Amino acid sequence: MAASLSRKPRRQKASRLFEPKDVSPRLVLWVTLGLFLGMGLSVLLVFGILWWIAPNAAPPRTKFGSKQAELGPRLEVSPSANRELLQRQAEQRLQGYGWIDRQVGAAHIPIDRAMVILAARGWPDHDEREEAR
């Protein structure tokens, strides 16, 4: 036992301290070339499919005819006139009477009239609304 303690440990060979074989440069080149070739073929395939589909696609039909898609979107000629018309319609809705759903009995009334009714009667409780139905 004393003999084994006095012995110095044997050194391993230097070749076993690192990997004995590197990656082949030729393999790296072939893999890189294969990747780029695959990407190129994918791009060509996509363009080929798009080219094959595009001539067969009919222009979309619109209510104005098939020429409308070629002409582009319809633009407002007079935005201020359109805005004034929209504001007038909104004012009529807010200040006028009308049915929301006649079958249910729901109607809209002017805002001023609704505020007067709420001030006179108070805000309806949950129970009162259920009884009204």
Image (tube, rainbow, N blue to C red):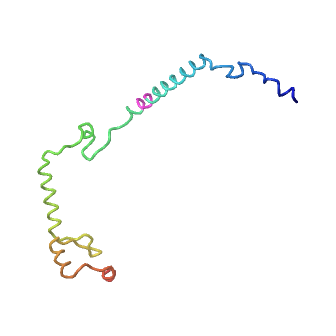
Question: Residue at image x 12%, y 47%?
Answer: 78
Q: Is residue 103 magenta?
A: no
* Rendering coords of residue 107 (x, y %): 23, 73
Residue 113 lies in quadrant: bottom left
Task: Left or right? Give the position of 4 relative to 99.
Answer: right
Q: Main secondary structure of the magenta part?
A: helix
* Rendering coords of residue 73 (x, y %): 23, 41
* Rendering coords of residue 10 (x, y %): 78, 22
* Rendering coords of residue 60 (x, y %): 32, 41
**Which is more toward the observer, 43 or 15?**
15
> Does residue 79 lie above or below 48 as drawn?
below
> Does residue 18 lie above or below 78 as drawn?
above
The magenta stretch is 47-52
Question: Residue at image x 50%, y 23%?
Answer: 36
Image quadrant where one finds the C terminus = bottom left
Residue 59 lies in quadrant: top left
Image quadrant where one finds the N terminus = top right
